[in-house]
Amino acid sequence: MYGGGEFNSLYYNNFACNPNIKEITEAVKIIQNRGKYDVIIAVGGGSVIDFAKAWRLFSKSDLKLIAIPTTFGTGSESTQFAVLYKDGKKMSLDEKSILPEYAVIDSNFALNSPQYLKACTAMDAFCQAIESFWAVNSTTESMDFAIKSISLCRDNIIEFVNTNNETAAENMALASNLAGKAINISRTTASHALSYSITTKYGIPHGHAVALSIKNLYQANSQVSDFDLLDIRGIDYVKQKFITLNNLLINENYFDTLFDKIHLETNISKLGISDINYIANNVNIDRLSNNPRKLDKNLLYSLFNS
Ligand SMILES: [Zn+2]
């Protein structure tokens, strides 16, 4: 903590990765000097940006928020969501007032990151864009963001993960931001719904956990019928979306090559994930109901390869 020069400033980092409610209420007590500051600048990964969003909400502050993500994938700088933990359980904030007013996207932060981190963050962005595109709550605007993000991911993800190419990193940073904008409108679907308990129970990073089911979910969703359709816009409308995705060369076969090339293991037994029952029982119901196809327990089990 320090105050400096002509500006009053306060540096605060008294919280851990995946911030919890206690840390936020503590910060609300400490950072009370309103009127002294004009702006909050959150520089860091998803946890830092989520902490700043939650602090602003809990302290009823009207300070503007500038988000500067140093890792990307979640697109947290362009969403009104924040993840917090209470007694080890994940809680989601979804409040319009916590959306950052400004974001500074600098892809240099992602260059030279470890390959596995890059693969996880890039897959989070990619899955968010794909899920947003087929989401029940998608709109023309969200689908536009999603398609742009999907095209950028398709063209840049392999190079981004395997090299330090600056253009690929810039394009993936943009793809992540666009995917954030897309899910801010549409929310995510089944792969995200299943991922949360995989992360909390097995410690698999978020982007990796989401990627585990995307290939089979693609296949399952593309076989949606009138019988199990959840999107009221109708079967022809939803089928057309899969034609659009196929035209972008994104189909279930696409993922086999992709996972090989970005070195991401998607066999759950090899990752030590054994209790699919637990994962299916702890699925996020809200996100699941945003999936275009109704998925019963058997279908949920079939989304994973072991
Ligand atoms: Zn995500």
Image: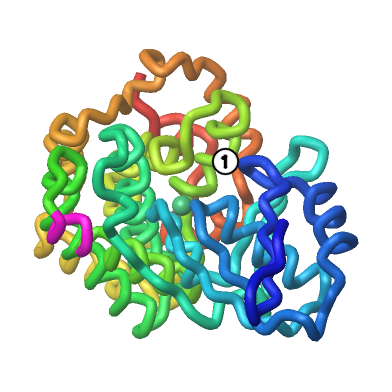
Q: Picture coordinates of residue 92 (x, y %)? A: 67, 56
Q: Is residue 279 left or right of residue 255?
A: right
Whether residue 220 is situated above or below residue 58 in the rendered picture: above
Q: Is residue 294 left or right of residue 164?
A: right
What residue is disc 1 on? Answer: 196
Q: Picture coordinates of residue 213 (x, y %)? A: 38, 38
Q: Picture coordinates of residue 181 (x, y %)? A: 42, 73
Q: Main secondary structure of the magenta part?
A: helix
The residue depicted at 34 percent of the width and 71 percent of the height is 178
Residue 198 can be seen, yes or no: yes
The residue depicted at 27 percent of the width and 45 percent of the height is 219
Range covered by the magenta-colored residues: 166-170
Quadrant in the picture for residue 25: bottom right
- The quadrant in which the C terminus is found is top left
The residue depicted at 48 percent of the width and 19 percent of the height is 273
Whether residue 280 is situated above or below residue 63 in the rendered picture: above
